[in-house]
Image: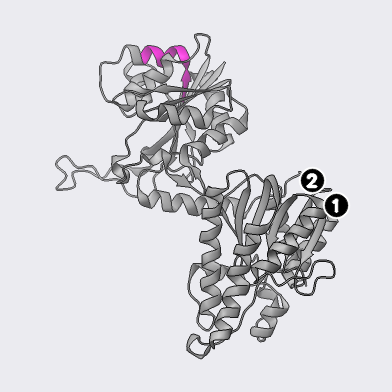
């Protein structure tokens, strides 16, 4: 029997928040839940034990009650004490135990598999990575005493994996107190600990900066997700702005997958509507619901750009830009009838990250779309809600406003549509997915 112990009893004092770091949200979900999901998805573990502070047990049990293999136990006053509490909660026939920080959500299945294999072989294994920085030894924290050889020192991570009998004995025999590392107890028990390679991505979220880096890692991972074998056949999706370049590409890609695409736009043949008007939006979505019932998802791809310095924009132009790029998205998300576990995908733009000269209102709206999407994902846990931010894309609107751009440096609408299909086949939520241009070698 292989058991995982996720340590999450820390108070988070270094994080500088009243809420312990493991309960902060990362892309719409609590950090420990990302880590737990990673362990569950591997299907490597017969039992997963969450060791948390007593005051958080009730809430954690409620959040994990849907999975019978997850157990929640109270932690101790130190990491060492919490590890022992987790070990004592393991069934007596446990063979291998994998101990991991719940605030390391990016551990890979490969690392977990290697840990288990090596623990079976050597009984004790530590996950480590090389240091990219020079190491300095000081006795008094005032001056350098020695510079050790960097290639002889590694940075320790988790998981740390052991024969259950070995690590339990090491804890019960421990003479040292407040150890921050289970391997040190095994070494003190005169048993060798072997190494396996970790990953630079397997960071421990301890500070506000770590949380920021984690958001970027999460975004990077989901922006480069390989196509899923899941099918969208016979699913039904509403596409707003389907007459535009990206909207048309989405419709074609969905139909190629065997899905049903419903286009809502001013020029739509079947469902024409001005989605900047709440009354129109409410009516057209009600019409679709009355005919088809709730749909599998909503993809908002409306975009409208006027390239002009802010001070030269008229009141009407400002209102038009905001209405098309932002207000319409609000109305559509509010009025759409979507099945539970369905999708909302709001298309933003790479301009969300920084204000852009000559299209300040457009960029501001795209930034607002990202924040709106993340907040809505937290409010609507029964749906998968994400934003997608493509870089410069070869659309008619882009060519009109930027006529001198080299087309070979632009994303194709088909590339954007493929990223959207990948998202619709996933179960991620609260994320910003960036679609970046990848240069293609020129033909000889």
Badge 2 vs badge 1, beta-carbon distance below 8 Å: yes
Q: Say which residue label 2 marks.
A: 231
Q: Left of 235 or right of it: where is 2?
A: left
Residue 381 placement (x, y as % from top left)? 58, 44
What residue do we see at 70% from left, 57% from top?
Answer: 298
Image quarter of the C terminus: bottom right
Asked if the stretch drawn in magenta spans residue 167, the answer is: yes
Is residue 440 among the parts visible in the rendering? no
Q: Measured along the vertical axis of the image, is residue 236 above or below residue 243?
A: above
What residue do we see at 52% from left, 13% from top?
Answer: 94
- Numbered marks: total: 2
What span is colored magenta in the figure?
Answer: 161-170
Front position in the image: 4 or 304: 304
Q: Secondary structure at mark 2?
A: loop
| SS assignment for the magenta stretch, majority | helix
Q: CA distance from mark 2 to mark 1?
A: 8 Å
Q: Say which residue label 1 marks.
A: 258
Residue 17 placement (x, y as % from top left)? 32, 45
Q: Residues within 10 Å of mark 1 (few under 14, many from 20)?
A: some
Front position in the image: 422 or 375: 375
Q: Measured along the vertical axis of the image, is residue 373 above or below residue 72?
A: below
Residue 356 placement (x, y as % from top left)? 51, 77
Asked if the stretch drawn in magenta spans residue 250, the answer is: no
């Amino acid at each position: 029997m292989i058991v995982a112990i996720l340590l999450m009893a820390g108070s988070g004092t270094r994080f500088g928040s009243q809420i312990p770091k493991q309960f902060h949200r990362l892309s719409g979900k609590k950090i420990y839940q990302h880590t737990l999901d990673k362990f569950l998805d591997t299907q490597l573990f017969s039992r997963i034990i969450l060791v948390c502070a007593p005051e958080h047990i009730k809430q954690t049990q409620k959040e994990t009650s849907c999975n019978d293999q997850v157990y929640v136990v109270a932690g101790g006053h130190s990491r060492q004490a919490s590890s022992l509490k987790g070990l004592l909660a393991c069934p007596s026939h446990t063979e291998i135990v994998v101990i991991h920080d719940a605030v390391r959500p990016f551990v890979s299945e490969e690392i977990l598999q290697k840990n288990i294999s090596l623990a079976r072989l050597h009984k004790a294994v530590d996950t480590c990575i090389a240091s990219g920085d020079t190491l300095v030894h000081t006795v008094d924290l005032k001056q350098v005493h020695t510079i050790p050889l960097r290639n002889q020192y590694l940075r320790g991570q988790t998981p740390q994996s052991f024969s259950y009998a070995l690590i339990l004995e090491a804890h019960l025999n421990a003479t040292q107190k407040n150890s921050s590392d289970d391997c040190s107890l095994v070494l003190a028990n005169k048993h060798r600990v072997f190494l396996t390679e970790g990953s630079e991505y397997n960071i421990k979220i301890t500070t506000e900066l770590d949380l920021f880096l984690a958001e970027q890692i999460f975004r990077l991972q989901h922006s480069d997700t390989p196509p899923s074998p899941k099918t969208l056949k016979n699913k039904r999706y509403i596409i707003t702005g389907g007459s535009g370049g990206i909207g048309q590409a989405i419709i074609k890609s969905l139909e190629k997958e065997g899905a049903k695409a419903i286009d809502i736009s001013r020029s739509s043949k079947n469902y024409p509507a001005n989605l900047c008007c709440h009354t129109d939006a409410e009516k057209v979505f009600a019409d679709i619901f009355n005919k088809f019932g709730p749909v599998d998802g909503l993809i908002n791809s409306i975009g409208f750009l006027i390239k002009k310095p802010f001070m030269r924009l008229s009141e009407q132009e400002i209102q038009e830009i905001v209405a098309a790029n932002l207000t319409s998205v609000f109305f559509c998300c509010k009025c759409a009838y979507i099945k539970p576990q369905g999708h909302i995908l709001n298309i933003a733009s790479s301009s969300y990250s920084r204000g852009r000269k000559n299209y300040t209102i457009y960029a501001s709206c795209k930034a607002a779309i990202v924040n709106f999407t993340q907040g809505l994902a937290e409010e609507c846990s029964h749906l998968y809600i994400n934003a997608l931010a493509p870089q410069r894309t070869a659309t008619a609107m882009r060519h009109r406003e930027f006529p001198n751009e080299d087309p070979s440096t632009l994303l194709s609408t088909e590339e954007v549509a493929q990223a959207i299909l990948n998202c619709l086949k996933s179960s991620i939520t609260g994320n910003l997915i960036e679609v970046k241009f990848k240069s293609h070698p020129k033909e000889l």
